[in-house]
Amino acid sequence: MSLDVSPALLEKAERGEVDEREFVDCVRTSLPYAWDLISSLVAQMGVEGTNFADNHVPPPSEQARGQLLRAMASDAIRGALQRHFGVKLAFQNCHRVAVFGPAQGPAGQQIEERYQRFTSVRAQLLNQSAELRDC
């Protein structure tokens, strides 16, 4: 199961649309490792004054890795996280998450180009290693 959905939230979903803030809170409490990692990358980007931050450290456990995979593999979860944090997320292998600031303003072209490089076939191939083969 990807998320720990409360009976009240499930009932709301069965009746109709759910407020995205409630969904984001469900993601935050259900996938704390993924939430904390993305939050820390967004904070790092803010502290450094850049429009990019990424993670190179593998998750500390298979449970944490599973949380990250579920967050990044679900279009609904990833989309909600992107909207909540105001970033674009990208993912390589089983743990390398990157956050990109909004591709607007004078730096917009550079941000988009960096995103395209990060998500390219070449970058995926270059980010391979024997240690990550079975992650």
Image: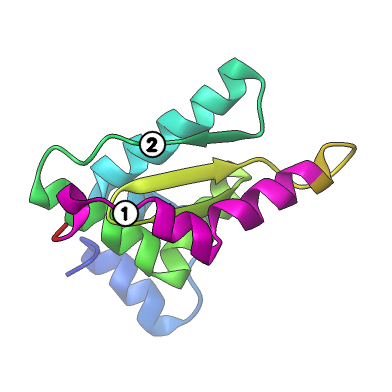
- Magenta residues, start to end: 110-133
Mark 2 — residue?
55
- Residue 122 position, x and y percent, is 51, 60
Circle 1: is it few (<14), some (14-19), or many (20+) Cα within 10 Å? few
Q: Nearer the viewer, residue 99 or 74?
A: 99
What is the x, y in percent for residue 127? 38, 50
The reply, left or right, for residue 110 in relation to residue 80 is right
Magenta segment's dominant SS is helix
- Give the residue type at disc 1: Gln
CA gap between label 1 and label 2 equals: 15 Å
Q: Report the coloring of the rendering.
A: rainbow
Say which element carries label 2.
loop
Q: Residue at x 63, y 45 (%)?
A: 86
* View extreme (top): residue: 47
Q: Does residue 55 appear anywhere in the picture? A: yes
Q: Mark 1 or mark 2, which is nearer to you?
A: 1
Counting residues from the start of the chain, the first of labels 1 and 2 encountered is 2
